[in-house]
Amino acid sequence: MQTFTIHQGLVAPMDRENVDTDAIIPKQFLKSIRKTGFGPNLFDEWRYLDQPGEPGVPESARKPNPDFVLNQPRYRGASVLLTRRNFGCGSSREHAPWAIDQYGFRAIIAPSYADIFFNNCFKNGLLPIVLSEPQVDQLFNDVYAFPGYQLTIDLERQVIVKPQGEEIPFEVNAFRKYCLINGLDDIGLTLRHKDKIEAFEKERLATKPWLAHTM
């Protein structure tokens, strides 16, 4: 998993509440058992005019919706997603944070998230930041007012730094912060104990050799 320490990036405003996971990555794209290739289909039904989108159709063959925020030139290359409350509601599909990450976003800022989506973000290297609604409102105003608006997110210090230098503190669970800073997903956390696991397996097979045989 990619580490997250300090990130500076362009902000894209998605001014919608209750964005569910089927909007983030529609159900037809869940057929894939790979964890890659979902970025082109992020927000597929909003992002393209030719519907419904289908797996395997190249992005170059699609018809973009010029009114959708991520298709607007001023927000291309954005890596910080600013949105409204209850982001990521709906089904618990882990493909949603996969698609957001593979599009190029490193962080999300919102007043609230659906619990399962919130947890899945941390497990996939995304930082979901919770701010108050007035703080989010002000960020929306700033993004709309200033083309090319960027934020710097310092996870170690737990602050968002605005272009003028103003800092906005945010809370994050200490264990989740540790995992992001060190790039550790669940597998990475387990592999920290690789030597102990291997020692346990050797001892187990030495005392119960019949376990090494399979039918």
Image: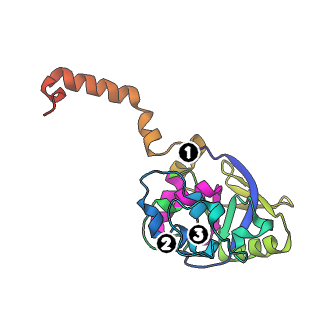
- On screen, 148 above or below 16? above
Q: Nearer the viewer, residue 15 or 112?
A: 15
Q: Quick check: can you spot residue 73? A: yes
User: Which SS class for mark 1?
Assistant: helix
Mark 1, other Cα within 10 Å: few <14 / some 14–19 / many ≥20: some
Q: Which residue is mark 3?
A: 43
Q: Nearer the viewer, mark 3 or mark 1?
A: 3
Query: How far is the residue under mark 3 from the one under mark 1?
Result: 30 Å
Query: How far is the residue under mark 2 from the one under mark 3?
Result: 8 Å
Q: Which residues are magenta?
A: 97-123
Q: Which mark is residue 178?
A: 1
Asked if residue 40 lies in the magenta stretch, the reply is no
Query: How far is the residue under mark 1 from the one under mark 2?
Result: 30 Å
Q: Nearer the viewer, mark 1 or mark 2?
A: 2
User: Which SS class for mark 2?
Assistant: helix
Quarter that holds the N terminus: top right
Q: Quick check: can you spot residue 130? A: no
Mark 2, other Cα within 10 Å: few <14 / some 14–19 / many ≥20: many
Task: Compare marks 1 and 2 and give the one earlier in the sequence.
Answer: 2
User: Residue 50's x, y, as percent?
Assistant: 60, 75
User: Residue 24's x, y, as percent?
Assistant: 55, 68
Task: Count how many numbered circles sit on residues in the image.
Answer: 3
**At label 3, which amino acid type do we have?**
Phe
Please report the residue visible at 63 percent of the width from the left and 57 percent of the height from the top.
Answer: 103
**At label 1, which amino acid type do we have?**
Tyr
User: Residue 20's x, y, as percent?
Assistant: 51, 74
Instruction: Please state if 132 lies on the left or on the right of 152 as rendered.
Output: left
Q: Which mark is residue 22?
A: 2
- Which colour scheme appears in the figure? rainbow
